[in-house]
Each structure stands twice: as C-alpha cells, then as structure tokens.
Amino acid sequence: MGADTGAGAGGAAGGEGFAVGAGVGERGDGGDELLLKLREFEGRAATVGGVGRDPVNAPMIRHWCEAMGDAHPGYRGPDAVAPPTMLQAWTMGGLAGHAGRPGRSDTNDELFALLDGAGCTSVVATDCEQEYLRPLRLGDEITFDSMIESVSERKTTKLGTGYFITTRMDVRAGGELAGTHRFRILKYAPARRNPRGDEGSAGVSAAKGAGRTADTTGAASLADVATAVSTADLAAPVGPAETVGATGSAVPVAPAAPAAPAEPIGTGAAPPRPGSSRPRPVVNRDNAGFWEGVGHRRLLIQRCTGCGTLRFPWLPGCNTCGGPEWDTVEASGEGAVYSYVVMHHPSFPAFDPPYAVGLIELAEGVRMVSNVVGVPHDRVRVGMPVRLEFRQYDEELLLPVFRAGAGREGGGTAGDLASAPAPPGGVGVPSGGGS
C-alpha cells in the first residue's frame, strides 16, 4: 500500500493546484504543509530536568521481576541492580500523571493538538529502543530529559493515515547518563471500515470522495484520505489466495466465504437506546474473514489444515502444531453456557444494564463470548442450552448473540427457564453440570 495517495480520489480541483482527496495541507505537487509544521517540533524539548518519583528501590524491582517471571539473582539482595528494561519505569508519573511535575513543557500537548486538529485523533504505540550505559543500583536518584527526535513523512497503514513520532529520553542516575529510551507512536486518522463487507457502502464512500471540492485552503481531512485508500484496496486486483497486508506484501488467506444461505439463522432485532451507538468491532487482516462471515449471517470457525484443530478467536497460526495454513467450518449454531457474568456497572450509553454476558461453548468444542438473550439476566445458568441468532443493532452493525432455550441438548423453553429459581450470585462458573 502506498504511503502517498496524492490525487487518488479523482482529478484536480480549481485553484492553486490542490488535488481532490489530498491529505491535510497537501498540494498536488506532493508537498505536505502539515508535515512542515510538524517538523518544526523536531529537536524541541518535552521535559528538561525531570525527576523520578522514587529512587531505584527493591519493591519496584521485585514487582517487575514477578510480573515478567525473571528470577535472575542479580536483581535480589542488598547489592541488587535493576533490570535494564526498567529504564523507563523510573521516569513514569504513575496514576497521578505528569501534571505539575518539574521540567515538563507544553511541547507534546501542542504537537498532539496540531495532529488532532488535522484529523489524526487516534494513537498506537509501535516500538521502543533502549541503550544501556550503566546499571541502576538501589538508591540511585533518577533525572531525565526528553525531546521530539523525529517526525516521519505521512504514512498510510491498515489502521489509517498519519505520522510516526519518535521521542528520545536520556535517563541519568546521580547526574551520570545511564541509558537512552526511544519511544515511537503512530498518530493517525482511522480508516473507515465496513465489518459487513458491503461493497455498496464502500462505493458510496468513494463517490463522496470523488465528488468533494477542495476548499479555499486546499485542506481536506486525513480521514478522507484513509477512506480513499481503503476503497482502493477493495478495488485493487488481488489473486484468489492473497491479500495485501499493512506492509504491502501478499499474505495467504482463506478462500472467500460462499453466498449467504437463503434462510439465515435468527432474525431478532434489538433497537438501540436513543442517542446511543454500540462500539464497532476492531477488524484486522487476522479476523476479517470472521466478520465477513457475520455479514452473511454465518459463524465461521478457523480450522488448521495441518492438524485439523479448530480454534476461536481467529489467529494467524495454529497453537497446536504451529501451522500457518487454515480453512473454515461453519458453526451449527448450537451451544451451551459454559460460564457467564451479569453486568451491572459501569453503565455504557449503548447498553442497558443489567445484562448477561456468556462464555458460550459451541457444539464444535470452541468457546466464544457473546450476549445471552431471550431470558432474564438473573435466570441464566451454567449448562443452559442456547442457539445462535444474529441481531441487527443499527444500519451497519450485525452481531452474533445466543438465545436461551434451544440448544444441542434440546433443553426446555425460554419460559421454563424463566420460571426456574435464580442462582445465589450474579456470576456463573463451570461446576461440572447444569443447574
């Protein structure tokens, strides 16, 4: 996938040579006005004379080693040193954050505000690099300086379009340089995704991009660029067993799912709460096939073609034999509640608590998390038979849920289950049998 979409959304608009569909401040000649502003931050200090909240100490080292499973004897006892990878930990602000701490400037706030205003509202950490010059010992007082080291050119990834920001931090112990920590993030405008794989919707987005007229400043939203790239991916010629990954390389994928059956499983509808919208699933190249199946009202399970093991959730490789090749089988839709929890708090606008979230064991043997519907939340039971249905929550969002009362063992009706006594608590755990 190219890093520069240029005039990919369709032709030049009138004016100073700006291209329709170009990125924020991007001219048709390839210039990037936003990048020029971002590059002004390179070399600017973010923190000068920052002070670690605590000296290097044994309790923090012990907690770190326990979390990492590191039993090296050099990290214990009166002469202990800190694990080198703790370098950044001694500079962090904790739950209180960095507000009011000495030496902190407004550089990061100003940089992020500029990116947010350009539509790059999302962020993901990508990698870090550390260089160690001397060990940190118990009692060392930590100070640090940090700066914006570099801003990349505009890049387009599967997540969206934006800029990689690298921050360098020099960490000192007793005034002596102990190590350097480089931390890199991608600040980006998220690509618009359609989990149902509806090409018509993608076409509408492309049409909107093609019909847009550049404004007097020539600045379009980076989100529009991401939409154009996403649409171009859908239209790009790709072989029958390949798809284009984030790096532009071809990777094997499963064959496309066949057309939806004439009689889909379940047609239940759940009207959303007024003014609310359910969170959208995160779709990536590892799970895109699953959501394509959901769009056709089919629940697809991955199967390793090497050893035949079924797996869920979807993964790029087999946990049993390590094989990378796979195909899919369609779930029958029958299952049982393996465990569950009743959600009371916190209250999210798109949900109406209390409601039951179940860990459903499918007839095929794999398990998945979903809502249990068709029975009051306080009547859900471990072992309760359930059956798959698909609920349309709004025009775009279709999700698999499980209706109580009809599963692989026949079970009773929803009415029978609703009249059963309630369990003593709001959480179900596997107990070797049903209720």
Image (spheres, grey):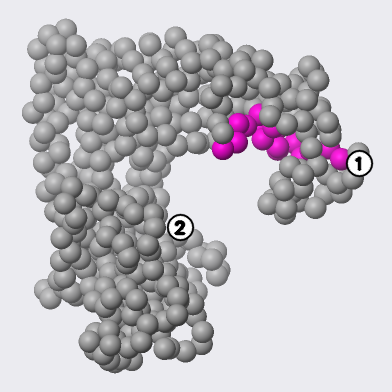
Measured as percent of width and height from the top left, residue 117 is found at 31, 22
Point out which mark residue 39 bears.
Answer: none
Upstream in the sequence, badge 1 or badge 2? Answer: 1
Question: Quarter of the image holding residue 11?
Answer: top left
Residue type of the residue flagged with mark 1: Pro
Q: Which residue is more in the foreground, 398 or 315? A: 398
In this view, the residue in front, 93 or 119, is: 93
In the image, which residues are magenta?
80-95
- Residue 35 picture location, percent across and down: 37, 15
Q: Which mark is residue 316?
A: 2
Between marks 1 and 2 in the image, the one whose residue lies nearer the viewer: 1
* Residue pictured at 53% horizontal, 15% vertical: 105
- Asked if the stretch drawn in magenta spans residue 392, the answer is no
- Quarter of the picture containing the N terminus is top left
Q: Find residue 331 and report its horizontal and vertical position in percent.
A: 31, 76
Residue at image position (11%, 30%) is: 210
Q: Is residue 418 visible?
A: yes
**Within-10-Å neighbours for mark 2: few <14, some 14–19, many 20+:** some
